[in-house]
Image (cartoon, helix red, strand yellow):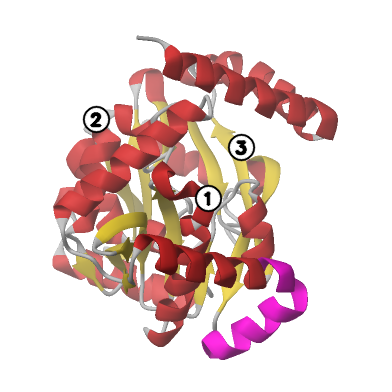
């Protein structure tokens, strides 16, 4: 008879054998081994978020699965790195059966919230309340194969971007692209650009939260097969004009923080950067770029297909579950109402942009 036990530990307490098994399970069970589901990402979050934990599922004394999460007050739990993580769930050995409510009980949680649950997470999919498209770029046939698809489906986008690339080179100086930049000053520049973009568009500045900035700096120095920080930069005459920081595994590059210098906005440097980055990713053996959940015209032009991610919450009777419902369900219903009505959605985006402009004008 199989005996199952669930132990809860801090990410730093994962043993070398645990880390190896976790990485092996992801490589063998996930069609797209997204680096946000790696043990290295979990451990990096553990260094900046004191509530980070891992529930280790053991069968007959041997580890058989891992459930990373963050625990807050009143047993309110959330996916590890919620707010910046683009892929969430549990990592289980095939055939392992776990009762999700027992998993919460063992983790001292009354609720576990997720907003980027990956497909195939059958343990949690029954508790999803929304599903969203996450556009991706397939590179299994190399960059040449991808460019053929781009010419067929987004020929105008490709032609315009190449023309902007030539204009940028003529007017700003010779272009140079670095796929894996290690200069921390350039990373700081990117974060400053991104903060300004958040404010300009009326959105919450993620880098105003200290833990997010610290997490990015930690991941920038992380180098592991299942999770490495990757800073890609486009230079014009030696000056950075666009940059992107993301995470990569052996086969997946998860796009995360793209931004550019507004002084060069008329040249579309962000689009030029993406084409250079896609080509370099294909040459590096990456099979897929995950552009992440969210609407953007450039994503629609670049994508080859879409993955589906889910949001929702698993609840167990308790104070934390009641607080979660009160604070999340009414706003979620409103967001869903707006999303399903394009005119309301467009009006909301215009309001955010106007608010961002007013905020930037304040002394």
Q: Are marks 2 and 1 in contact (CB under 8 Å)?
A: no
Q: Is residue 65 visible?
A: no
Of label 2 and label 1, which has the lower sequence position?
2
Mark 1, residue position:
266
- Is residue 106 positioned above or below 75 on the image? below
Estimate the spatial distance between the alpha carbons at disc 2 and disc 1, rounded to whole Å: 32 Å
x then y, percent, for residue 88: 47, 51
Q: Quadrant of the C terminus?
A: top left
Q: Secondary structure at mark 2?
A: helix
Q: Quadrant of residue 78?
A: top left
What residue is shown at x 45% (from left), y 58% (from top)? 255
Q: Residue at x 40, y 44 (%)?
A: 263
Using the image, determine if residue 259 lies above or below residue 198: below
The reply to whether the magenta stretch includes residue 9 is: no
State the residue in front, 59 or 87. 87
Q: Is residue 322 left or right of residue 157?
A: left
Give the x, y percent position of residue 151: 70, 79
Q: Which residue is mark 3?
A: 312
Q: Nearer the viewer, residue 342 or 10?
A: 342
Name the main secondary structure of what is drawn in magenta. Answer: helix
Q: Which mark is residue 313?
A: none
Q: Nearer the viewer, residue 166 or 99?
A: 166
Q: Position of residue 68 (x, y in %)?
A: 36, 48
Of the numbered discs 2 and 3, the one sitting upstream in the chain is 2
Which residue range is magenta in the image?
A: 140-157
Mark 3 to mark 1 CA distance (whole Å): 40 Å
Of all residues, the one furthest to the front in this rendering is 171
For the residues labelled 2 and 3, say whether their Cβ atoms are less than 8 Å apart.
no
Residue visible at 42% across and 61% down in the picture = 171
């Amino acid at each position: 008879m199989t005996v199952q036990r669930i132990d809860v530990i801090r990410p730093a307490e994962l043993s070398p054998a645990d880390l190896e098994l976790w990485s092996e399970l992801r490589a063998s069970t996930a069609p797209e081994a997204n680096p946000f589901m790696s043990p290295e990402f979990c451990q990096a979050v553990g260094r900046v978020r004191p509530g980070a934990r891992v529930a280790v599922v053991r069968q007959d004394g041997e580890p058989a699965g891992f459930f990373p999460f963050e625990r807050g007050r009143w047993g309110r739990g959330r996916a590890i790195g919620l707010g910046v993580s683009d892929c969430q769930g549990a990592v289980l050995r095939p055939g392992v059966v776990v009762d999700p409510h027992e998993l919460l009980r063992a983790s001292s949680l009354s609720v576990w919230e997720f907003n980027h649950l990956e497909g195939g997470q059958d343990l949690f999919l029954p508790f999803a309340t929304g599903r969203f498209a996450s556009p991706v770029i397939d590179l299994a046939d190399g960059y040449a194969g991808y460019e053929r698809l781009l010419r067929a489906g987004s020929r105008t986008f490709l032609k315009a971007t190449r023309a902007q690339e030539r204009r940028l080179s003529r007017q700003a100086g010779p272009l140079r692209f670095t796929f894996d930049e290690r200069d921390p000053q350039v990373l700081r520049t990117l974060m400053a650009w991104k903060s300004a973009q958040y404010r300009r568009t009326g959105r919450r500045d993620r880098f105003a939260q200290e833990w997010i900035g610290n997490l990015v700096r930690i991941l920038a120095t992380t180098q592991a097969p299942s999770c490495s920080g990757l800073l890609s930069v486009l230079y014009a005459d030696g000056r950075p004009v666009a940059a992107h920081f993301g995470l990569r595994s052996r086969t997946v590059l998860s796009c995360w923080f793209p931004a550019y210098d507004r002084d060069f906005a008329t040249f579309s440097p962000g689009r030029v950067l993406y084409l250079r980055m896609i080509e370099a990713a294909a040459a590096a053996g990456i099979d897929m770029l995950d552009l992440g959940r969210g609407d953007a015209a450039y994503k629609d032009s670049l994508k080859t297909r879409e993955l589906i991610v889910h949001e929702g919450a698993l609840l167990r009777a308790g104070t934390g579950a009641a607080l979660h419902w009160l604070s999340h369900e009414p706003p979620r219903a409103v967001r869903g109402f707006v999303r399903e009505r394009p005119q309301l959605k467009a009006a909301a985006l215009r309001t955010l942009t106007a608010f961002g402009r007013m905020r930037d004008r304040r002394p």
